[in-house]
């Protein structure tokens, strides 16, 4: 099947998501909440595109739009620019402390919204849910979305060190805005208020993970994948 993205003919399979097709064809669509290992969120709405189908058009999130017939797509139309800019402006109010979002706002011309105040000064989290999904995919569920409304945030139960956390750092790695603080220092990893002893490969010295992660993964020989 052939669809057209920004005037370029792109081959795709039925059911593929637009974002996948665009990336494979070297067409850039900005994203925040998308991760190849945890697809299908549409939480941030930054990956908006305009889809023209016959005489109709709609602006939609490309990461969850499946292609099932020939369509024409624009990633940078006037409608897309306006709506993406407003989405980024609102995300900036949600996470005013994020340098990533600030840079995207500048790059994509997000408007200033003077009548609104930041939800939490210095906050970096956009509540995309990637960290929670990454943790759940490992079977741990050490972090959750807490509170409601404008007070909602991601953390450990009762903001106490979680017995389920293995310090793997997956949540910090998938976070698109740098909201999760993780520090590796002097052989100790600190994350979510807990400390974990780091384990290094006994052959090459490469960092493998924490003791808790090694135990969960069944790695008892202290060797990295390369060794």
Image: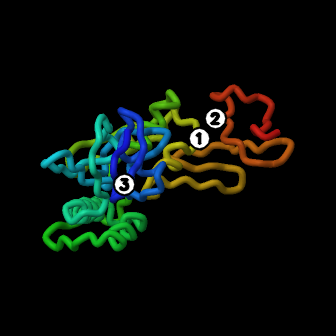
Cα separation, mark 2 vs mark 1, equals 6 Å
Q: Which residue is mark 3?
A: 125
Q: Please tell me which of labels 2 and 1 falls first in the chain.
A: 1
41, 28: nearer the viewer: 28
SS assignment at label 1 = loop
Q: Please tell me which of labels 3 and 1 falls first in the chain.
A: 3
Alpha-carbon neighbours of circle 3 within 10 Å: few (<14), some, or many (≥20)? Answer: many
Res 116 seen here:
yes
Where is residue 94? Give x, y as percent: 28, 59
Where is residue 45? Give x, y as percent: 28, 51
27, 43: nearer the viewer: 27
Answer above or below: position of 89 versus 42: below
Q: The N terminus lies in which quarter of the figure?
A: top left
Where is residue 86? Give x, y as percent: 22, 63
Q: Quadrant of residue 116?
A: bottom left
State yes or no: discs 2 and 1 in contact (Cβ < 8 Å). yes
Q: Which residue is mark 1?
A: 168
SS assignment at label 3 = loop
Res 156 seen here:
no
SS assignment at label 2 = helix
144, 186: nearer the viewer: 144
Drawn side of residue 85 relative to residue 165, left or right: left
Q: Which residue is mark 2?
A: 213
Coloring scheme used: rainbow
Cα separation, mark 3 vs mark 1, equals 20 Å
Where is residue 189? Give x, y as percent: 62, 49
Drawn side of residue 22 relative to residue 210, left or right: left
Q: Please tell me which of labels 2 and 3 falls first in the chain.
A: 3
111, 118: nearer the viewer: 111
């Amino acid at each position: 099947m052939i669809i057209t993205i920004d005037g370029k003919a792109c081959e795709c399979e039925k059911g593929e998501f637009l974002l996948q097709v665009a990336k494979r064809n070297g067409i850039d669509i900005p994203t925040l909440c998308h991760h190849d290992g945890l697809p299908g969120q549409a939480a941030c709405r930054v990956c908006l595109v305009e889809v023209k189908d016959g005489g109709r058009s709609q602006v939609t999130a490309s990461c969850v739009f499946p292609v099932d017939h020939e369509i024409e797509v624009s990633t940078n139309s006037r409608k897309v620019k306006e709506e993406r800019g407003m989405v980024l402006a609102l995300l900036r109010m949600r996470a005013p402390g994020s340098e990533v979002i600030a840079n995207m706002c500048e790059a994509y011309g997000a408007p200033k919204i003077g009548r609104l105040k930041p939800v939490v000064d210095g906050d970096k989290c956009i509540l995309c849910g990637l960290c929670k999904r990454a943790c759940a995919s490992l079977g741990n569920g050490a972090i959750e979305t807490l509170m409601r409304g404008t007070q909602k945030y991601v953390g450990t139960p009762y903001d106490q060190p979680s017995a389920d956390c293995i310090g793997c750092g997956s949540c910090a790695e998938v976070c698109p805005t740098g909201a999760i603080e993780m520090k590796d220092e002097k052989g100790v990893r600190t994350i979510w208020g807990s400390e974990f002893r780091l384990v290094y490969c006994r052959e090459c010295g490469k960092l493998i993970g924490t003791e808790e992660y090694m135990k969960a993964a069944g790695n008892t020989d202290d060797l990295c994948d390369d060794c």
